[in-house]
Image (cartoon, rainbow, N blue to C red):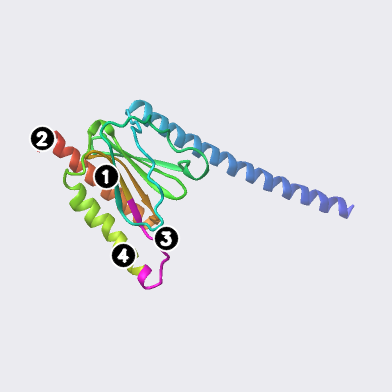
Amino acid sequence: MAQDTEKMKSMLAFKKRLEEQLDRLTAEINEVQATLDTVNQILLEKGFKRGDIKEVPASPAPIPKEVVLPKHESEPPKPMPTQQHTEPESVIPLKTMADEPLALMYFDKQSIHLLPDESKNFSVNMPPFTNFLVEKVFSKMQEKDKELVRLGQLSTEKMFSYNIVREGDLIREIIIKNADDERLKELKSSIRWTFEKMYEKMKSGS
C-alpha cells in the first residue's frame, strides 16, 4: 500500500513537470508567433524590402569595412536569411517620434542586421551618419575592444565589428557583430537618433 502511495506521488510530480514544460513551450510558441506577426506587418504595411544586397563575406579579423555595391546590380535579390545561424530571433522597428518608419533591426545568433527603409534613400554622406554614428559610436566601441585584445582581456573573435553595405552612396544594410546587451541599448538609441536626424534633413531639403 505504501508503495502504491509513493508511485502515485511520483506520477503526480511527473505530471506537474510535464504541465510546466507544456506551459513554457506554449509561451515560447506565442512569443515566436507574435514576433512573426510583427515582421509580417512591417514588411506588408510599412513597405520594407531587402533590395539588391550581396552578403558580405566573413572577415578573418573583425575590421570595419564598407562594401560598395554597383548602382545597377544585375544579380537578382537574395532572399532574407533563413534557418541555421541566420534565422532572426527578434525584430525591432526603429521609428521617428511621429511613428514614421526609419529602419528595421533584426537579430540572429551571431549578429545584428540593420535595414534602412529604402523609400528614404539614406546616404552615407548625410550628417550625422559618418561624423556621429560611425566615428563616435561604432569606431569608439571597436577601439575599446582593440585595447582589451591588446591587454589579453578579450579574444579577437569576440571584438566588436561592423560592416556597411552600400549601393553607390545609399546605405542598404549595416551588419554589427559582438554587441553585448549594454552596447545594444546604446546602439539602438544612437542608430534611431542618427536616422531620425538624417530624415529631418531630407524633409527640410538641407
Structural distance between the alpha carbons of marks 3 and 4 = 12 Å
Name the residue tied to disc 3.
158
Judge the density around disc 1: few (<14), some (14-19), many (≥20) Cα neighbours within 10 Å.
Answer: some
Structural distance between the alpha carbons of marks 3 and 2 = 41 Å
Inspect the image, locate mark 3, and give the three-letter code of the amino acid beneath it.
Lys
**Mark with earlier residue (3, 4):** 4
Check if mark 2's residue and mark 1's residue have beta carbons within 8 Å.
no
Q: Secondary structure at mark 3?
A: helix
Structural distance between the alpha carbons of marks 2 and 1 = 20 Å
Name the residue tied to disc 2.
205
Q: Which residues are magenta?
A: 149-162
Name the residue tied to disc 1.
192
Relative to 59, say whether 104 is above or below: above
Return the mark for residue 144: 4
Inspect the image, locate mark 4, and give the three-letter code of the amino acid beneath it.
Lys
Check if mark 3's residue and mark 2's residue have beta carbons within 8 Å.
no
Structural distance between the alpha carbons of marks 4 and 1 = 22 Å
Check if mark 3's residue and mark 1's residue have beta carbons within 8 Å.
no
Judge the density around disc 4: few (<14), some (14-19), many (≥20) Cα neighbours within 10 Å.
Answer: few
Horizontal relation, residue 76 to residue 85: left or right: left
Residue 75 pos. (x, y %) = 36, 31
Q: Is residue 91 magenta?
A: no
Relative to 64, say whether 120 is above or below: above
Structural distance between the alpha carbons of marks 2 and 4 = 36 Å
Inspect the image, locate mark 1, and give the three-letter code of the amino acid beneath it.
Arg
Q: Count the marks.
A: 4
**Mark with earlier residue (2, 1):** 1
Residue placed most toward the observer, 164 or 3? 164
Structural distance between the alpha carbons of marks 3 and 1 = 25 Å
